[in-house]
Image: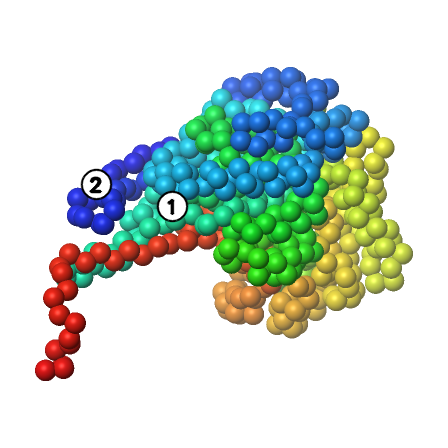
Amino acid sequence: MLRVRAAVRQSWRGFKTFPCAAVEVKNEPVLGFTPGSAERNELQKALDGLKGKTEEIPCVVGDEHVWTEDVRYQLSPFNHSHKVAKFCYADEALINRAIMASVAARKEWDLTPVQDRAQVLFKAADLLSGPKRAEVLAKTMIGQGKTVVQAEIDAAAELIDFFRFNAKHAVELEDQQPLDADGSTNTMLYRGLEGFVAAVSPFNFTAIGGNLAGTPALMGNVVLWKPSDAAVSASYVVYRALRASGLPPNVIQFLPADGPVFGDAVTASEHLAGVNFTGSFPTFKRLWKQVAQNVDSYRTFPRLAGECGGKNFHFVHKSAHVESVVKGTVRSAFEYGGQKCSACSRMYVPDSLWPLIRDQLLDIHRQLKVGDPVEDFSTFFSAVIDDKSFARIKKWLDRAKTSSTLKVVAGGNYDDSKGYFVEPTIIETTDPRDAIMSEEIFGPVLAVYVYPENDYKEVLQLIDSTSPFALTGAVFALDKNVIAEAAKALRNAAGNYYVNDKSTGSVVAQQPFGGARASGTNDKPGGPHYVLRWTSPQVVKQSHAPLTDWRYAYMG
């Protein structure tokens, strides 16, 4: 998976020689888990070993495992009687202690050569690709309610890719140096930020937590990582993999915490240098406002990077390939219960195609199995993450059943007696400006607006202006002129834009991910420029010829 070609450049660069290194990595293969395969057998062992078990997970500051009195439990979404993990919330005092311990460790870590820091991520990737793969998958499945394929593309493939490609980009960044001139040399030093980075990660992707904490650390930063309550178990596997791969103590502090308590503590610290966030739009706005209110107290201007979800669209033109539309939409809208940031939740279909598309959607809908992804590998998706999510989605479904402009075409039922189960639901609306077309639901709910086929130009404008979000979107059309038209109309409507493909499924290094507007700061993790976000470069000019006159030639 990894090959490094290095030839050391011997020319003097002021402080050290820089390696001319080309780091070659490839995307981690997605394993099939077919019956009888080695990976299936390993995963089954790991799943069996976790049945009925409750793991105890402490806060970790340096090498110290700390328990506070505020004990919490992570529940399995599809069986909420199973306490997957017992953990505790870090209080304000512990968070502040972690900040000071991190700041004390920062200088030494920042001065560690980037090649050595990168090796930590390369080793962690190898660990997760091999010995720890089954464990992180099993804990993602049980703790976050993922099917085997959804766990594999997240907690294995994507996380491994984040570590390897970001490490590659960090090493190769050293070779991006300014020009020299006669008598002097110029050096760009890629320093970490002066202070600490607060990493706040979501429940829906184990890989995102690893990236939000791991990439700033890779670039010489120290990090306070607050994992999601609903992903503590898998996140702890990732943290321990980094430590086992040589990450020193105090570089990443593992701190489950109440969101507002954590946010208040980190934004109140003069040492805050950055926030790396994935979660809800309101939470990110709250953090942004807190940083603004406290800006006079900081030693540096904090970097704010955030990804806040989307109201992602599938636009269907009359020239579209219907089978691709139907099957792509089923996967995008309903895989992982619609809980991907990129999931399709609004669809625009021409009236000439809607009867055919509707019938094919309904045919597949009848075949979708919702249940326990551990006991039945044929499950298409499982329960939504927790009781809050269930209650929110329930309100939308109840509203749809009583609205004069909404019609439930399929699904609409729910049951939280054992797990937080919601049927895959398709809702048709006659009002394209209804809230269901603009607000994020984050569940297995697809809203469809059927438009007169010749009004597609107006619909493109509608898509662009309906929702405050701009994360992902897809255009299905075989007419090249329409594809070109849509690209112009929807230029700012999505940060990840797909043509004749579903709105989900971005792959590290292939489709760097992120959107603007209310969807976030669009820093494109998974791309080569993301590592720059977590550096504070210093340019050093060194002259090798003494200055012998203060006068200029024009002075005579």
Residue visible at 73% across and 56% down in the picture: 447
The image shows residue 7 at horizontal and vertical percentages of 21, 40
Q: Quadrant of residue 298?
A: bottom right
Viewer-side label of 2, 1: 2
What colour-coding does the image apply? rainbow
Side of 398 where 521 appears, left or right: left
Residue 135, placed above or below residue 273: above
The image shows residue 415 at horizontal and vertical percentages of 84, 37
Residue 63, placed above or below residue 368: above
Determine which of the numbered discs, if any, sits on residue 169 in the image. Answer: 1
The local secondary structure at tag 2 comes to: strand
The image shows residue 145 at horizontal and vertical percentages of 68, 34
- Residue to which mark 2 is pinned: 8
The local secondary structure at tag 1 comes to: helix
Side of 108 where 52 appears, left or right: right
Amino acid type at circle 1 is His
Residue extending farthest to the left is: 556
237 or 489: which is nearer to us?
A: 237
Residue 107, placed above or below residue 449: above
